[in-house]
Amino acid sequence: MITIWNKGWKPFLVLLLFFLFWEGITHFQEIPAWLLPAPSIIFKEAVTSYPLFLPDIGATLKLAVTGLLLGSAIGFLIAMTLHLIPSLRNAFYPFLILSQNVPIIVLAPLLVIWFGFGFFPKLIIIILVCFFPVTIASLDGFSNVPRELMHYMRMSGATRFQTFAKLELPNALPPMFSGLKIAVTYSVMGAVISEWLGAEKGIGVFMTLSSSAFRTDRVFIAIFIIIFFSMLLYSIIVMIEKNVIKWKVKGEE
């Protein structure tokens, strides 16, 4: 997560002031803990009850990472196929848009009916929310190649495969990583939403049980866990990007 907070001390200061304001307002206004617990109460509960949600973290993280990897790979393959076969792109591009217009909360019960309460329907939900940003970003990267470079490749007698491998693919990497950054923020939340619909363990299950018992402090613990792992996975993508797209990093420096 260091890559997210490497802009100096200002983000830490803003975050500290936010928690201090939150702590102060709950004490001065005497807000009940079941309605809005203070950060100190949430932290204390996290320390004392971590054995309860520790197995849930592993289950959610496994689901989120697996869905992210599969969704990103499928998204990139779809983008590559549609780019290399323009007739397929014209035929199937509208269906990519339509795939995002069906609310997950409506689709999820159908997946449970079709595939049961196991790991597979939850995985499908995460794949559906992760593949789209990678597909669209990669397609834009493949298409937005500078004309002069494309003209140079044609003048040099490069084949279609050589043009794709040496020009279009490298040009698509920065947009593709932008799509990955969007997908990674969806993956953890997608895993939690899928767990709401039926699971034995996971942060979504922990959040549902805590909400039903009016344990607002534990609900906030689940929220902070989701935020933490979303930022962690985002930081990993940023580090991979810096090592893969070195020419971009040098240009930014």
Image (cartoon, helix red, strand yellow):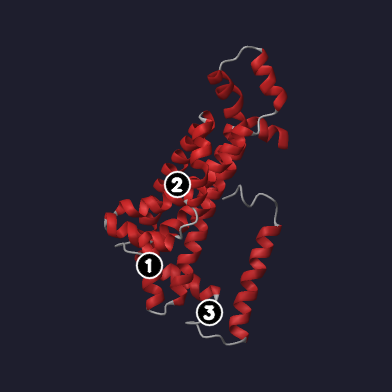
Q: Residues within 10 Å of mark 3 (few under 14, many from 20)?
A: some
Q: Residues within 10 Å of mark 1 (few under 14, many from 20)?
A: many
- Looking at the rendered image, the disc whose residue lies closer to the viewer, 1 or 2, is 2
Residue 86 found in image quarter: top right
Tell me if 224 is positioned left or right of 174 in this view: left
Q: Which residue does the numbered mark 1 point to in the structure image?
A: 206
First reached walking from the N terminus: tag 1 or tag 2: 2
The secondary structure type at the circle numbered 3 is loop
Q: Which residue does the numbered mark 3 point to in the structure image?
A: 36
First reached walking from the N terminus: tag 2 or tag 3: 3
The amino acid beneath tag 1 is Phe
The secondary structure type at the circle numbered 1 is helix
Q: Which residue does the numbered mark 2 point to in the structure image?
A: 68
What's the CA distance linking mark 3 and mark 1? 18 Å
Query: Horizontal and vertical percent for residue 140?
Result: 61, 38
Residue 192 found in image quarter: bottom left
Query: Of residues 14 and 73, which is closer to you in this image?
Result: 73
The secondary structure type at the circle numbered 2 is helix
- Looking at the rendered image, the disc whose residue lies closer to the viewer, 2 or 3, is 2
- Indicate which disc residue 91 carries: none
Decide: marks 2, 3 in contact (CB < 8 A)?
no
Compared to 230, does 74 lie above or below? above
> Which residue is depicted at the point 52% across and 78% down?
37
> Which residue is depicted at the point 61% across and 87% down?
29
Query: Horizontal and vertical percent for residue 183?
Result: 52, 49
Visible residue check, residue 237 = no
First reached walking from the N terminus: tag 3 or tag 1: 3
The amino acid beneath tag 3 is Leu
> Which residue is depicted at the point 58% across and 41% down?
137
The amino acid beneath tag 2 is Leu
